[in-house]
Amino acid sequence: MSIIEVGATAPGFSLDSHQDEKVDLSSFSGKKNVMLVFYPLDFTPT
């Protein structure tokens, strides 16, 4: 596991959107600000 400091550049990654399309973080580079958020499932003991 690696720790990313606040304000650091995020490593490249891709994921599936809610519309089942691949989204690459690099596709937003220089176009939009991106905020990465971790959200645990509702009603889980975190």
Image: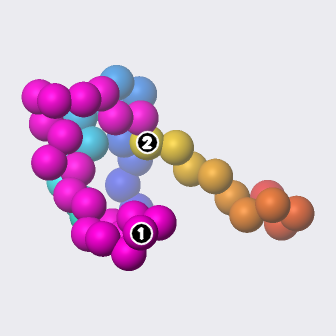
Helix, strand, or loop for circle 1? loop
Q: Which three-letter amino acid code belongs to the residue tagged 2?
A: Leu
Q: Where is residue 34 in the image (x, y as percent from the top left)?
A: 34, 34
- For the N terminus, the image quarter is bottom left
Question: Is residue 10 part of the magenta span, yes or no?
Answer: no
Q: Say which residue appears at 11% left-offset and 28% top-offset.
A: 30
Q: Which three-letter amino acid code belongs to the residue tagged 1?
A: Gln
Q: Say which residue appears at 41% left-offset and 27% top-offset.
A: 6
Circle 1/circle 2 CB separation < 8 Å: no
Quarter location, residue 14: bottom left
The first of marks 1 and 2 along the sequence is: 1
Q: Position of residue 40 (x, y in %)?
A: 69, 58
Q: Where is residue 28 in the image (x, y as percent from the top left)?
A: 19, 40
Residue range corresponding to the magenta coloring? 15-35
Q: Is residue 22 left or right of residue 39?
A: left
Q: In this view, does 26 lie to the left or right of 46?
A: left
- Residue 36 marker: 2
Q: Where is residue 46 in the image (x, y as percent from the top left)?
A: 79, 58
Q: Is residue 15 left or right of residue 31?
A: right
Check the image and report above or below for 3 versus 35: below
Helix, strand, or loop for circle 2? loop
Q: How far apart are marks 1 and 2 (CA)?
A: 19 Å
Q: Mark 1 points at which residue?
A: 19
The residue nearer to you, when weighing 7 against 27, is: 27
How crowded pointer 1 is (Cα within 10 Å; few <14, some 14-19, many 20+) is rated as few
Check the image and report above or below for 46 versus 36: below
